[in-house]
Image (cartoon, rainbow, N blue to C red):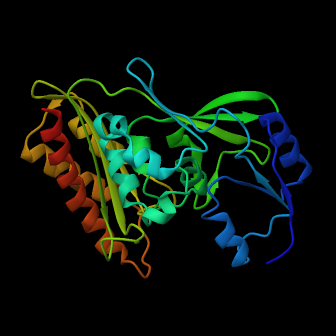
């Protein structure tokens, strides 16, 4: 392993100063489940590793009926997975954290770390985008808020500046009669990257769909919303014909590649299958 300097700042401003002194060769560490592996495999070779675990106020997991869910940068995936409030109000996120890696990894990895890793197949990204999550980011100019669906710019790339830190994820409270579903398809059940992932958040008013977000993973360079599919459902009565049309539209919006996990044609077909299944489950949950 290549030598690096190690720091343990106790404030956000100190951490930002250390990032700036790293001249683009500094890495933050919280859970470390990705970074340490990448350093050992020479994928990343930072000069500075900055441990943010001693900075107070970033390990919270709090739900408020008015403002929603707040997840700190140090909150582990396992804490989110086992939270009764997440299981009750954010069922798709709870499902995604259960599907994430092994239980040993989930006890160290953080949801914010999974977001900042920006893998196109990351499990937590689709439900967070479908739920309208935003990121609270701290940098030299203070705090700013970024919509999660705008945060990802390519595989492993984000809109986060080299001297900025994601401190929290914030998710709005669910509206009444909202169903949330995340379905992951892989070659095996456990310890697997998604070949295709689909998240749906759907709000009903009687027989009419008032709002819907459909997010596809592992079928484009970043997670993407299937907006044409959403338009086929929003403010319309949902029946099997509408669901089939939306599933077909989502298939047309996917931009998959072929790799060891599946061909582009197979992935497109699975987008249609999983979108139909996710919409049916979300509709049932919302009613």
In this rendered view, identify the residue nearer to me: 131 or 227: 131
Q: For residue 283, what is the image quadrant?
A: top left
Q: Is residue 26 above or below residue 246?
A: below
Residue shown at 59% from the left, 57% from the top: 117
Q: Residue furthest right?
A: 21
In this rendered view, identify the residue nearer to me: 24 or 80: 80
- Specify whether 283 is left or right of 102: left
Q: Is residue 66 above or below residue 76?
A: above
Whole-percent x, y for residue 151 in the image: 58, 44
Whole-percent x, y for residue 128 in the image: 43, 43
In this rendered view, identify the residue nearer to me: 92 or 237: 92
Whole-percent x, y for residue 209 in the image: 19, 30
Considering the image in quadrants, where does the N terminus appear?
bottom right
Q: Is residue 167 above or below residue 172?
A: below
Q: For residue 5, what is the image quadrant?
A: bottom right
Considering the image in quadrants, where does the C terminus appear?
top left
Whole-percent x, y for residue 10 in the image: 80, 39
Q: Is residue 12 above or below residue 263?
A: above
Q: How many marks?
A: 0
Residue shown at 31% from the left, 34% from the top: 89
Q: Residue furthest top?
A: 66
Q: For residue 256, what is the image quadrant?
A: bottom left
- Specify whether 152 is left or right of 226: right
In this rendered view, identify the residue nearer to me: 280 or 80: 80
């Amino acid at each position: 392993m290549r030598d690096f300097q190690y720091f343990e700042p106790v404030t956000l401003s100190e951490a930002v100063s250390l990032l700036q002194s790293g001249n683009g060769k500094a890495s933050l560490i919280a859970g470390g489940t990705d970074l340490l592996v990448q350093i050992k495999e020479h994928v990343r070779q930072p000069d500075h590793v900055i441990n943010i675990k001693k900075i107070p106020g970033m390990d919270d997991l709090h739900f408020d009926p008015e403002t929603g869910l707040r997840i700190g940068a140090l909150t582990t995936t396992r804490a989110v997975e086992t939270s009764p409030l997440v299981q009750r109000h954010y069922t798709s996120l709870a499902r995604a954290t259960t599907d994430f890696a092994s239980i040993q990894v989930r006890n160290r990895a953080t949801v914010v770390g999974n977001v900042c890793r920006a893998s196109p197949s990351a499990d937590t990204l689709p439900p967070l985008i479908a739920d309208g999550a935003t990121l609270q980011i701290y940098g030299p100019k203070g705090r700013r808020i970024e919509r999660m669906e705008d945060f990802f710019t390519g595989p492993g790339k984000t809109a986060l500046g080299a001297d900025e830190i994601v401190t929290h994820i914030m998710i709005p409270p669910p509206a009444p009669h909202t169903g949330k579903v995340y379905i992951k398809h892989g070659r095996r059940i456990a310890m697997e990257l998604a070949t295709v992932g689909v998240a749906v958040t759907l709000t009903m008013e009687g027989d009419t769909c008032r709002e819907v977000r459909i997010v596809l993973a592992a079928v484009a360079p970043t997670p993407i919303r299937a907006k044409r599919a959403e338009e086929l459902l929003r403010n319309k009565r949902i029946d099997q014909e509408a669901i089939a049309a939306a599933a077909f539209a989502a298939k047309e919006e996917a931009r998959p590649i072929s790799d060891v996990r599946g061909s582009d044609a197979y992935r497109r077909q699975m987008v249609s299958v999983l979108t139909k299944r996710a919409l049916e489950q979300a509709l049932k949950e919302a009613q």
